[in-house]
Amino acid sequence: MDISRREFLKYLGITTAGVSLAGLGCDSMWSVPDEVFEKIGGAPRIETWKTSVCSLCSGGCGIKVRLIDGIPVRISGNPLHAVNRGGICPMAEAGIEALYNPDRMRQPLQRVGERGEDKWQEITWDEAMQTVVSRLQALRDKNAAHKLAFFTGPDNNLSSRLNERFMQAFGSPNLFVFDQNKPSTAATYLTQGHKSELAYNFKDIEMLINFGADFLDEGPSPIRFNQLYSEFRNRGERRNVKVVHVDSRLSRTASNSSRWLPAKPGTMAALALGIANVLIKDRNFDSRFIKAHSFGFDDWVDSSGNSRIGFKTLVEDNYYPEKVAQITGLPARQIVEVAREFGAAKSALVLAGGHAVNSSNGVYTLWAIECLNALKGNYKDDGVISVPKAPPFSEAQKTEVDQVAASGLNQPDLLQSMSEICFTDDAVAFLPKAMLENQPYQIEMLFLANANPVFNSVNQGDFAAALTDVPFIVSFSSSLDETSAYADLVLPDHVFLEKHDVAYSVPMVDFSHFGMQQPVVAPMYDTRHTGDVILQIAQSLGGTVASSLPWADYKTYLEDHLRGVYETGAGTIFSERIDEDWLEFLKERGWQLFEYSTFDEFWQVLLEKGGWWNPFPDATDFRRLIKTPSKKYEFYSQVLEGEIKAHLQTARASEDEQNEVLQKWKVEARGDLVFLPHYEAPELRDNEGRFPLHLLPFRLITNITGEGGNLPMLQELFGMLSRNYWQSWVEINPETAHDHGVSEGDLVQITSPIGSLEVEARLIPGIMPGVLYVPFGLGHKSNGRYAKGIGVNPYEILLEEFDHLSGTSSLTSTKATVEKRNRKEMT
Amino acid sequence: MSELRHNTFEDEDLIRPIEQTGPGFYLMVAILLGVIVFAGYTYIRQVFLGLGVTGLAQPVSWGFYIINFVFFIGISHAGTLISAILRLSKAEWRRPITRMAEVITAIVLAIGGLHPILDLGRPDRMLHLFTEGRLQSPLLWDVTSITAYFAASTVYLYLPMIPDIAILRDRGTRPRWLYEFLAWGWRGTEHQKKVLERAINILMVMVIPIAISVHTVISFIFSMTIQPGWHSTIFGPYFVVGAIFSGIAALLIVMIAFRKAFDLGKYLKLIHFQYLSTLLLIMSFLWFYFTFAEYLTGFYGHEPNEMRVFLYKFTGDYAPWFWTMGICNFLIPVVILVNPKTKKIPGILIASISVVIGMWLERLIIVVPSLANPRLPYPTGIYIPSLTEWSLFAGGVAVFILAYMLFAKLFPIISIWEIQEGREESVHAVAERLKSYLPDPPSEQLLTEKLGSKR
Amino acid sequence: MPKWGMVIDLNKCTGCGECVTACKVELNVPVVGPEESAKGRTILCMDILSTYEGEFPEVKMRHMPRPCFHCEHPPCTKVCPVRATYKNDEGIVAQIYPQCIGCRYCQVACPYTVKHFNWTKPEWPEERCEALNPDVSVRPEGVVEKCTFCVHRLQKAKEQAAVDGRDLREGDYVPACVESCPTKAMYFGDLDNPKHKVSQLKKSHRAFRLMEDLGTEPKVYYLSEVE
Ligand SMILES: Nc1nc2c(c(=O)[nH]1)N[C@H]1C(S)=C(S)[C@@H](COP(=O)(O)OP(=O)(O)OC[C@H]3O[C@@H](n4cnc5c(=O)[nH]c(N)nc54)[C@H](O)[C@@H]3O)O[C@H]1N2
Ligand SMILES: Nc1nc2c(c(=O)[nH]1)N[C@H]1C(S)=C(S)[C@@H](COP(=O)(O)OP(=O)(O)OC[C@H]3O[C@@H](n4cnc5c(=O)[nH]c(N)nc54)[C@H](O)[C@@H]3O)O[C@H]1N2
Ligand code: SF4
Ligand code: SF4
Ligand code: SF4
Ligand code: SF4
Ligand code: SF4
Ligand SMILES: [Mo]
């Protein structure tokens, strides 16, 4: 049967739509008469597609936007994109709403009320720019360029390079990126002395042990990991990948693994070392790699002739399965089983994230876990771990630094002299402390872009207080979030669908690539690309600042960078024809895949296909990257030794003095143990048993750190799996719930030592007894009508606790209690 | 002849309420109108704002409107069916009851029949039922049979009223034009009487299957789906029994109310109540039997989805309603009605009210739990009716009472001519009939003689 | 006559929720807001059923995406009084929104509880109105809706094929959820055409349908997880 067009339209209700929709407030495009439909024959309106990049999380997925008569109506995945291969997640799918959000900022605003009060007045770009430039000029005139600080969000696009460049030319060391990925390179730093982000070749692994990273819901690229985990279970002819997940919550990541090991919160280090214990006892590790390329595995004698204990002794003496079983609450048999399987696998990998990192003992935990990769020899030249190279962008000419800039750059940055933290320079959680104490100096002007710490940090109150003290704050946010409420000026950015950019190096991807973000629609309002604004500011400041940032606009800046890729001829633009065999064929011929006669052609094809990649991962020579004193992979970290020494007053400090700083950093271990990965009990304040439960947060694929809050679709689907729409909830084990008189669906109050929240209870057997899990993402106090007042923000009741080695804030240090509330009557 | 009757009118008591109106009446009308106007307002609001104003949601998307639909239509079996059965079986004690019963039917059918419209998401498209109706849908069977039943039962109510209306016309009761019109030229001639009797007899026979069909097809709305708790062959008779059950209870309540209000003790004697309440008792047992059979098969089948609904009613969220229903429909009526000491008017009133409540709960328990327990793992729904639904329920009841009052204000609530007929003819007829029931006399010849003479 | 059907491989599905979101956007399903959601009126034509089995620590969590099953013998269409839902010749159980009187009989009759009612007037911010999918009508309040198997895409595919002067090929007609599933866990095609992937997959030993005992013959098959 062929339904006639007319009949078909009738069935779909389109013909009558014009009539019945008139009352919906959405009529214009529905009142298209039949004849028009029929004349166009097929598409009722003109349909086009544009590729771009989703920038709602660090995943940088390639997208394809469907436009009807030039109006974007839907986002789907770009199947050509080398990383996400056509997949997108709910965030991107709902991302279309970002364009049409009625609470978007439409033009620059100037604060008229108190800070945080959210009272604004509209001003023109010219006025706004004038204010900003004159203030910046004044700073430079005072020779106080370093007193400008810039807080940006996690951008793996070229605007971060521009920001760096601007800050350098201007003369301030105070550029901070609000991203947890930086502090979490800790283990790499301690064992290898460099801070490069690592990438993994998942194609050949047989086993993966994941310590706490909820990759499927919040990883560095959630959609890629959904694809990977699915592929792990469907390898066809090849053996499936065995995935062991360690965490106290049966997350989606855990449930998509082959085995779930619910270790007690904060004890993952012990488990990792227990596995190491079995491997070592079974002599089931890469002894060749250990022997040739590692330091501190066996006991050793230092230069002063003292004998020092090595990793092997430590693990053998302290982390036998029975003891680990006691610490972690897992049966010893299971630990041995997993360790044996891990040892037996030809190629196996461990990964960590989530609560393994965000813990008061995070560095030692990551480090202990990381050692398993070394034992498995994963750092060999052909190992599964690599450090991908950035695409061959052309390097712009060197930034010119005038005298003002040079003196500014000579100043210490805000965190440099922090004695509370051991070694990271990205411990953004400590910024408020520095700012409130005016250490080492007062910040006079602050730029905020793409970061919302007043909402997204355990010490959000401190952030708010610190911001209140800054004389002048400029926010580039595209919506009025909690942090922007403290700004003096808001210079709204476009939303991602209106912007040009290049998103490169998605975390953990082992080949170099970039995606082309292009405006799929002209800016809807009087907003400006923050990149353009920065360039314009630089031009207005003149002098070396202007000459260091000579581009007319951000697009030119991008083109300039991409010229390098064009000229080297490396890699290839995404294309339909790239399959594995074809690649092999090309590789033999030296991978010069396509040729373009002009750069313009190259640029056009890039925009059309969505990006570029170099399918052949460069074999990484770890020995070249390693910067440890021993020039080897260090089980015993001399890097840490050096870092601690730097905090001591004298070169030959006494043991007492060292103990003093260790105590300040809440490190329990003493002696050699400090420099070896080991298990330390997590920091937990119990207040005499008044708070018997452990409170842990988690994230969902339906919400980015909180930014998704103003997309109504995401708010509605926020907890779609547990059916919590527009709502926060707490996940509790049924037994624990029962002990506290809580049943499914009850309204409960969760109380921590610093506050309480009201949420709905979900009784879930996949939660470890004694633990409360509350999702991050809701509880906005501003950010528009869809976000404000919906759900709760667990940050509000999390204790301010840190891992003082890296300065990362701990999300796992809070104890709480739960109690049933009477449900408010619904009307 | 009618003049004659007028002068020596024995049944003045039945006419008096029509010709005299007390202040209580107006007060009552005012209150009821208030309730009805409020219900009308909430309904109009619902039309404008959509069904969102109800407490319905996913998965419980049917609630009060459907429950009340089934309930009201059930009550309607009070009348026409009972009166037809009693007439057919020539139960002489029926005479003061039939009119009251039939009025219930006509009013409650109209109210019940409107309920599905209250429930429509798009009442503006109601006519689609006629223009695009699909006869395969049980919903259309309902539309058909309810319309038929309504037509039959109003005619069946009207025909026996004609002689009484003629009495009112002849007395000159106001509004004259109404009685003039409705009396349809009744003069009480032999021919007219014959025609009337014939018509009543035909209708009487017709109305019984229609009435049974109505509640059967209402049950089909549920049983034609394959939902747990609904998909049951027993539902047809079960619903009919339940309907008659609640119908009798409603009739008893109405009788007791009018006996009190119009002081009709002379007509509605204890014996009437006792006969009817015996019928109520029988129906209570029958109802129990059906309920028992229905749930026992469900329980023994132990189909998981069926069991979920079963347990939801027996021990789960709906247990309070379920067990209250059991008490109201079985325990209370049985305890009261088996004991001759309590089988008096107050006791009967309590039993009847209890049954009406119990039967309403039964409808609730049939509609909601099956929907609240979907087969797939969705959250089980909670259904809390909104103010709109309550007010429309109250409105429905108010319309019933008001309509009944207005009817009683215009027409005699007890059939005068049938009472008179009873007085004049029944004693003789019953004696004759009794004779025919009794064992035949021994002689074969005598028998043929008698039969012959009868002819 | 093709018989359109879907196969969902539960071993591939990770429960990411993209299909749910894609469906909502493709079909112009409105967001109902916090108050209505709290009453249980969220409309999900594609939904994910999540279940837990076992007790801590031996727990298994399962996800099952659930569209309408487009039953071969649909209990929902049988009961519709006005033919506002019916099974078309290609087996798709369609809804005619302008015809529906909103009695919700089909909704209560569907054994899979997949139908949703538009309890309130759909609302979008004014700015968004222009950006709805023009291929799919916006439903008014008071009618029932459900997954349509994206039948509007079938029509487009047919017209495209007609323009190109060829028959419909496998892959021409793919619903939004299937198309956007990042793990490629869903397949769509003609169940009767032996060349189509779905007709092969439905014969897999892992294939099953939900509540087959009801005799509804769903046209959505699942492939069970491999333990
Ligand atoms: N739904 C949702 N998705 C999100 C977000 C969200 O809020 N919601 N946030 C996005 C953002 S901003 C981020 S930063 C990401 C965070 O997500 P992730 O990037 O997963 O962050 P972490 O959990 O810190 O994991 C960091 C990774 O680095 C590895 N790692 C850390 N330190 C070391 C080390 O020393 N050695 C080795 N070998 N490996 C190390 C860990 O094993 C882990 O794989 O998630 C992004 N995705
Ligand atoms: N303890 C602890 N704290 C954490 C983390 C943790 O794991 N543990 N996670 C950390 C991590 S990884 C991160 S990345 C941060 C995330 O924290 P944030 O960086 O604060 O992330 P968002 O909430 O996404 O805030 C981004 C803000 O940028 C604005 N914005 C959106 N789009 C644009 C745009 O196009 N241009 C501009 N200029 N602005 C825009 C929005 O208003 C939004 O409020 O939270 C950190 N906080
Ligand atoms: S994973 Fe991140 S980048 Fe990819 S589609 Fe989702 S939000 Fe966008
Ligand atoms: S989009 Fe695919 S993987 Fe995600 S939930 Fe749906 S079927 Fe499963
Ligand atoms: S799943 Fe339900 S709505 Fe869909 S065809 Fe079957 S019975 Fe009808
Ligand atoms: S709600 Fe609409 S589609 Fe469903 S049965 Fe009623 S009229 Fe038919
Ligand atoms: S087939 Fe279309 S309508 Fe059905 S669930 Fe998928 S996207 Fe939604
Ligand atoms: Mo981040």
Image: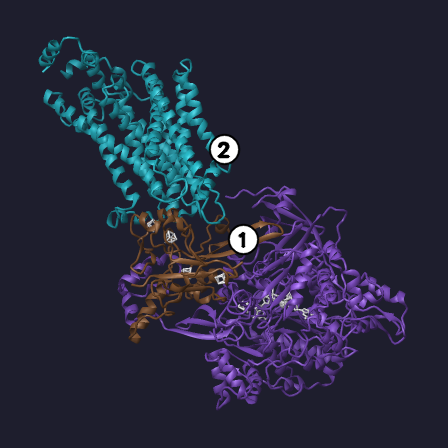
Chain colours: A purple, B cyan, C brown
Looking at the rendering, which quadrant does residue A353 occupy? bottom right
Residue named by callout 2: B320
Q: Quadrant of ligand 3?
A: bottom right
Amino acid type at mark 2: Pro
User: Is any atom of residue C113 visible in this view?
Assistant: yes
Of residues A72 and A545, the one nearer the viewer is: A72
Q: Label 1 crowding class (10 Å Cα cut-off): few <14, some 14-19, many 20+? A: some
Tell me residue B303's x, y (percent).
Answer: 44, 42
Q: Please identify the quadrant where the N terminus of chain A is shown.
A: bottom left
Where residue A110 appears, as percent x and y from the top left, is: 60, 68
**Number of numbered tags placed on the structure image:** 2
Image check: C55 left or right of B327? right
Quarter residue A669 falls in: bottom right
Element under label 1? loop
Q: Position of residue A447 (x, y in %)?
A: 65, 72
Disc marking residue A512: none
Q: Is residue B334 left or right of residue B171?
A: right
> Can the viewer see residue A606 in this picture?
no
Can you identify the residue that label 1 sits on?
A: A722
Q: Secondary structure at mark 2?
A: helix
The residue positioned 61% from the left and 67% from the top of the image is A207
Q: Is residue A722 positioned above or below A231 on the image?
A: above
Looking at the picture, does residue A646 appear above or below residue B197?
below
Q: Check disc 2: other Cα within 10 Å, few if <14, some if 14-19, many if 20+.
A: few
Question: In which chain is the residue bearing label 1?
Answer: A
Identified by mark 1, the residue type is: Ser
Q: Is residue B190 left or right of residue B314?
A: left
Q: Is C213 in front, or is A188?
A: C213
Q: Quadrant of residue C200?
A: bottom left
- The x, y position of residue A344, in whole percent, is 65, 67
